[in-house]
Image (cartoon, helix red, strand yellow):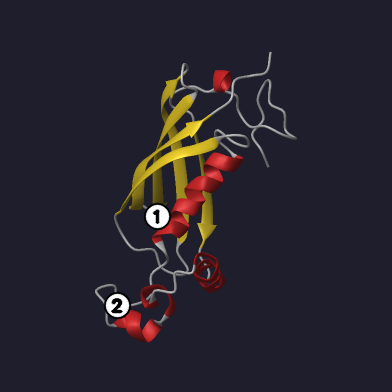
C-alpha cells in the first residue's frame, strides 16, 4: 500500500520533491524467519557460518547465529522504495553502523526520517535507523535522488 497525498500517482510514482518536508518519516517492520536468512544467504552468496551454521556461531561472541547486517539495510531500501520517498526514488548513498546483532525471530523496524532536502540537486538525505524493540541495531544516513513533479 502506497501513501496517499495530493498529487500522488499511485500507479507509478511516490512522492515528488515538492511534496517532501524535513521531518517526514516512514517505517516498515519485519519478523525475521529462518527462511529469510537462508534465502538472503543464497541470494547474496554470503554463507558466512555466523549466519548459517549454529554449531560454528555458538562458539562466537554472539553465542548463536545472527542475521546478515545487510538484511536490515534491505529493510531501509524497502521503506525508501515503497513508502518514502517511494517508487521512483533512486538510492545514491548509504552510510551504516551496525550496533547490535539481530537474531532469527526478532522483529526489525526500519525507520527513515527526512533530515535535509536539496532542491537544486534533487537530493533528499534521510536518517535511517533499524531497531529491535528499543535496541538500535543499525543506524546511519542515506541520500536519494527524487524527481520533480512533471510540468
Q: Left or right: 50 with respect to 82? A: left
Work out whether residue 75 or residue 90 is closer to the camera in this orientation and state it: 90
- Location of residue 143 by image quarter: top left
Q: Which residue is mark 1?
A: 133
Please report the residue visible at 39 percent of the width from the left and 45 percent of the height from the top.
129
Mark 2, other Cα within 10 Å: few <14 / some 14–19 / many ≥20: few
For the C terminus, give its image quadrant. top right
Residue position marked by numbered label 2 in the rendering? 63
Helix, strand or loop at label 2? It is loop
In the picture as drawn, the residue positioned furthest to the right comes out as 11
The relative height of residue 3 versus residue 45 in the rendered view (above or below) is above
Where is residue 117? Give x, y as percent.
44, 22
**Badge count:** 2
The residue that appears at 48% across and 47% down in the rendered structure is: 76
Name the outermost residue toward the top.
151
Kindly report which numbered mark, 2 or 1, lies closer to the viewer in this rendering. Answer: 2
Amino acid at each position: 500500500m502506497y501513501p496517499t497525498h495530493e498529487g500522488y500517482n499511485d500507479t507509478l510514482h511516490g512522492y515528488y520533491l515538492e511534496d517532501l518536508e524535513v521531518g517526514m518519516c516512514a517505517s516498515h517492520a519485519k519478523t525475521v524467519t529462518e527462511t529469510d536468512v537462508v534465502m538472503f544467504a543464497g541470494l547474496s552468496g554470503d554463507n558466512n557460518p555466523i549466519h548459517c551454521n549454529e554449531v560454528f556461531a555458538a562458539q562466537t561472541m554472539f553465542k548463536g547465529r545472527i542475521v546478515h547486517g545487510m538484511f536490515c539495510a534491505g529493510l531501509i531500501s524497502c521503506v525508501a522504495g515503497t513508502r518514502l520517498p517511494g517508487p521512483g526514488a533512486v538510492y545514491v548513498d548509504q552510510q551504516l553502523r551496525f550496533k547490535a546483532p539481530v537474531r532469527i525471530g526478532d522483529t526489525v523496524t526500519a525507520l527513515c526520517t527526512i533530515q535535509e532536502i536539496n532542491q537544486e540537486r534533487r537530493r533528499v538525505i534521510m536518517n535511517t535507523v533499524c531497531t529491535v524493540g528499543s535496541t538500535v541495531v543499525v543506524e546511519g544516513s542515506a541520500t536519494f535522488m527524487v524527481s520533480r513533479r512533471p510540468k
